[in-house]
Image: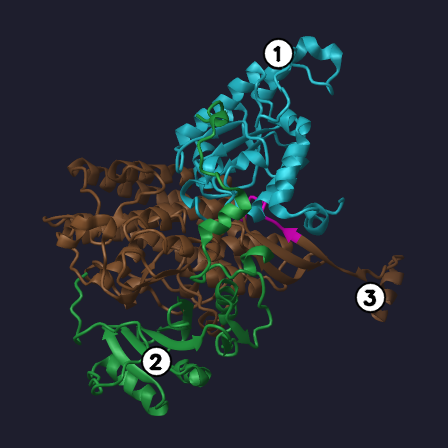
Chain colours: A cyan, B green, C brown
Amino acid sequence: MSEMKGVNENDGVIHYELQEFKLFEPLFRWARKKSLWIVAFCTGCGGIEMPPLANARYDFERFGVMVNPSPRMADLFLITGYVTPKTLKRIIVTYEMMQGPKYILAHGSCPINGGVYWDSYNVVKQLDRYIPIDVAIAGCMPRAEAVMDGILEVMRRIEKGKADGWKRYHDNYEWYKKNQDELFGEGWREKEAKRWLAWI
Amino acid sequence: MDMNEKKAGESKVEEAKPVEEAKPVPDTKEGRLIKALTEKAPYAEGNVRRERRVEFKVPAGRLHDFLELASEEFEMLMQISTVDWLKEGEFELIYQLWSVSEGIHAFIRTRISRDNAKLPTVMDIWPVAETYERESHEFFGVIFEGNPRLGPFILEPREYEKHPLRKDFNTLGYAKTIYGEDFDRYDESKTNYVI
Amino acid sequence: MANVEVPKELREEAKQHDMYLHPIDKDVYELFFGPQHMATENFSIILKMDGNRIEKAIVNPGFLHRGFEKLAEGRPYFSNIALILRICVPESDVPENIYSMAVDEIVGWEVPDRAIWIRNVVLEMARMSSWMFWIMGFGNEIGLYTAGQWAAAYRERFMRLFEELTGGRVYHIYTVPGGVRRDIPGDHWLRQLRDTVEYIKSKMKDFDEILFDNYITFERTEGVGVMDKRFALKHAVTGPNLRAVGIPYDVRKDDPYYLYDQLDFEIPVLKEGDSLARTLVRRYEIEQDLYILEQLLDMGPPSGPYMVQDARLKALPRFKPPKGDAYAHVESTKGDFGAYVVSDGSHKPYRAHFRGPSQSHGVTVLEELLKGARIADVPVILKTLDNCPPDIDR
């Protein structure tokens, strides 16, 4: 992690936003945090605590959060639990299809260091080396209130300007790409993802 | 659940011991089923484990014929389990059958050698055996002749070549070669975003 | 690609009405009904389509494979409970119970009566919360989201009861070989369970009006995905799917375990074998399950210890059962869930093999039933077969 470039630039405006709108940055952050849309991709065990969140008991729709099937229209990606290499390829492609600003919320102890499956041959340990994580929730599996706290933490970070996973991915793309290629083999997109996506 | 077994002794998972004396099969529903099947197929040995559990041992060459005979009474093939006996150099395959009309579960065991593991497929009797054989092939390397779809099914090609569930595959060592040596070391840069 | 010729009579008839019929190119394309989808839970099907109809379906599992059977060989017997219960996520008590039943049979000790009663009640509660999860999935796929939201809310009541009993909402780690880990918290818990059962009984007529007696459901599920008896037996179909074909096979009646031979309940059986029959069988089974829970609560828990008192348990991580093997199976909401455990006398299992019901439903049966169906029928067939992808991959 020490080879990453400095990401908390003090003026908070990155190079591909228009300079005239710098004044409106707090308004944009308020709008972004109050309308997070989730990609409908249930990647692991923790996906069973997502429907209770959408219900009347721990309602998250009052914060503007909604589940949407299309990655092009979504902001928040919930990685609910463990990740296998076969799923990781789809996660990377889906993450790159989303349009910035985009945030990742990782559930459970499996993305942090492998969790219960620490000696398994088919579970990715340390997900942070392949895609940038903004907030991680500890637990196995975390309760619905803990997931709600995680979403609120993402909202607090957006307001302060610290939720910059997408900027980190863009600035340090070579480092992420090196890790991904080490795991999957050089040129995995051209060989495998070409089968699934028509425009590669 | 109290285990009042009707016969003394539990059946052990070993190769066929030299027969001291043939144990008499009791005259229950399970016993009569075993007698009927072993009359038609004298190369198989059967015994009763407990109520609703029977067991047969069949040599690998006559497996397909025995399963055809058994499929009249036992209509459903529930699973094909493979056990890897590394010290004896053999794979043991156990076909778990269930009889819907009688309510009896049968274990049908065979042994094949580990180096050249080949068996005929039972897809023509039960079409669902395709899935079970693909899984057994992928994890252990047993080749079923006649199954057209053997190949990577659940695993990716890189792990499929190693046949992971064999006893001489070390899963922690393999994970370390792929993911690095110190993946469970505490990483301080993670404390700023874990809640 | 082949051009389809328009028949001569149709061309003449069109000419009379001043219309011209174009020949359509017959083209087969591949559609990935992929893992990123709201209906499948991280499970992928490759469909070869001809227009709107499916010609061939190839199932692509493996996104959730963690190698449970290899990991279970590296942990002692009692530590495995914390691992293997993640095999079936909506009802996580079922893998615990079959593993404990198999190890109990290998060891040969007698589980006390109070533990059997508690295990039975926990299994029935897990079945009820899994039915609610199924109604949520099925309602969302048909498009009747109200039923889904209600069912998710009623599932919360069972999770609250589980949390007080075992400490966890979804993963319980409660049933161990030899009994259960802790006792019932008190009489108030039994009273709350009875209130929950009464509450859900009173709400079943609401579910009927919205979901099960609805014209939309009939139109979408009648005649879709039809099986017959011979197909079902040859493809190892179990559970409510088999009872919708006309075969009355239920593990609780044919191979009774725990207290089911003392309880009085019926098995609903229909004979059409299409998706509507599968849906209605599940609806009648929910009523029977509520009746079973009431009878168990009327019986009351017997007194005594909740864990077997045995000297071998004092040496716990090094607990060594004798050599042997055993097979145990249980009726879960998805079908017949079985476990085969082999022990060679050491403190770790030699082989633990699990047979999930979706190994036959979600792979072979799905590929056969999807032939000739339209693209809009795929979520309906998936949800009425009650496919659970972690069962296939383990």
Residue B78 position, x and y percent, is 41, 68
SS class, disc 2:
strand
Count of numbered badges drawn on the protein: 3
Comparing marks 1 and 2, which lies closer to the viewer?
2
In this rendering, the label closer to the viewer, 2 or 3: 2
* Mark 2 neighbour class, 10 Å CA radius: few under 14, some 14 to 19, many 20 or more: some
Q: Is residue B50 above or below residue C203?
A: below
Q: Which residue is mark 1?
A: A26
Q: Chain of mark 3?
A: C
Q: Amino acid at mark 3?
A: Ala
Q: Tell me the distance, in whole angstroms, between the alpha carbons under discs 2 and 3.
A: 55 Å
Specify the amino acid type for callout 1: Pro
Task: Look at the numbered disc 3 and give the secondary structure of its residue.
Answer: strand
Q: Position of residue B19 (x, y in %)?
A: 25, 85
Q: Which residue position holds label 2?
A: B57
Please identify the quadrant where the C terminus of chain C is shown.
bottom left
